[in-house]
Image: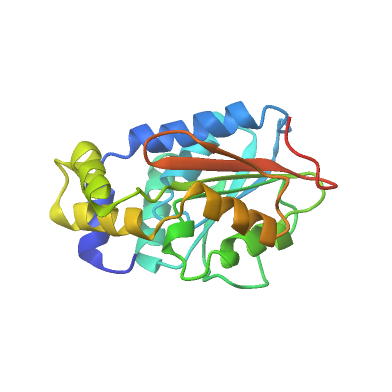
Amino acid sequence: MLDEQQVRAYAAADFSEPHGRFVALLKEKLPSLPSRGRALDLGCGAGDISLRFARVFGDWTVDAIDGSPVMLELGRRVAAEAGLASRVQFYELLLPTESPPHRDYALLFSNSLLHHLSDPEVLWSTLRCWAQSGSSIFVMDLLRPKSRAEAEALVERHAGGEPEVLRTDFLNSLLAAYRPTELRTQLEQARLGHLRLEVVSDRHFIAWGVDHEGRPAA
């Protein structure tokens, strides 16, 4: 997201419900996370989820990466205001790249990046390559509705009062997202078939697991 009008609208929007649910589901589905560690947020945007994670997991640090310098600058400002700048670091990176900020991630997570990528393999291969044995993975993203009419109804239901730029972005994002069968195929092709997949709302799925000898999460 590079357009300043989009960034301003995004910054003013209330994402507390889905972003709060992201962190709650991550905590629920990955109960064996260590008490401290380093996490990587892929496609962090303005960093709201990175900061929410840091508040809940008080002994963790987060590397938050995104391709939008405008969004990253917003994230840095909010992190500083929240007193979290020492624990949440922002990096401008475009995927695919072979050079993550660090190599010792105990957790890799992503929210709503997959549907923005022209090739979904970019996200899955990045997670596979950057995870170490024992690293946890958690992804949440949109589901594509069965029809455009259903997508428009979701926009009205969940973003009816938002500015037109956000409503348009939401509709386009829904139409660019994937169905569960497509997601399962993507995971199998990326050699991440051990990740579990679950639909958790009328517009979201999650995929999660531990990258350790191909064993599924508990």
**Which residue occupies 21% across, 37% down?**
157
In the displayed structure, 112 sits above or below 28; it is below
The residue most toward the right is 213
On the question of residue 109 being in view, the answer is yes
211 in relation to 29, above or below: below
Could you say where residue 190 lies in the image, as x and y percent from the top left?
A: 68, 61
Depth check: give the residue in front, 100 or 177: 177
Vertical side of 35 occupied by 71: above or below:
below
Is 79 on the left or on the right of 120, as rendered? left
Residue 41 visible in image: no
User: In the depicted view, which residue is nearer to us: 44 or 110?
Assistant: 110
- Horizontal and vertical percent position of residue 89: 54, 54
Work out whether residue 180 or residue 35 is closer to the camera in this orientation and state it.
180
Residue 132 x/y as whole percent: 78, 53
Q: Residue at x 29, y 59 (%)?
A: 172
Picture quarter with the N terminus: bottom left
Q: Quadrant of the C terminus?
A: top right
Q: Nearer the viewer, residue 32 or 214?
A: 214
Where residue 107 sits: x, y (%)?
A: 67, 45
Colour scheme: rainbow
Q: On the image, which quarter does residue 29 sit in?
A: top right
x 59%, y 26%: residue: 28
Q: Give the total of numbered labels.
A: 0
At 41% across and 34% down in the image, what residue appears? 201
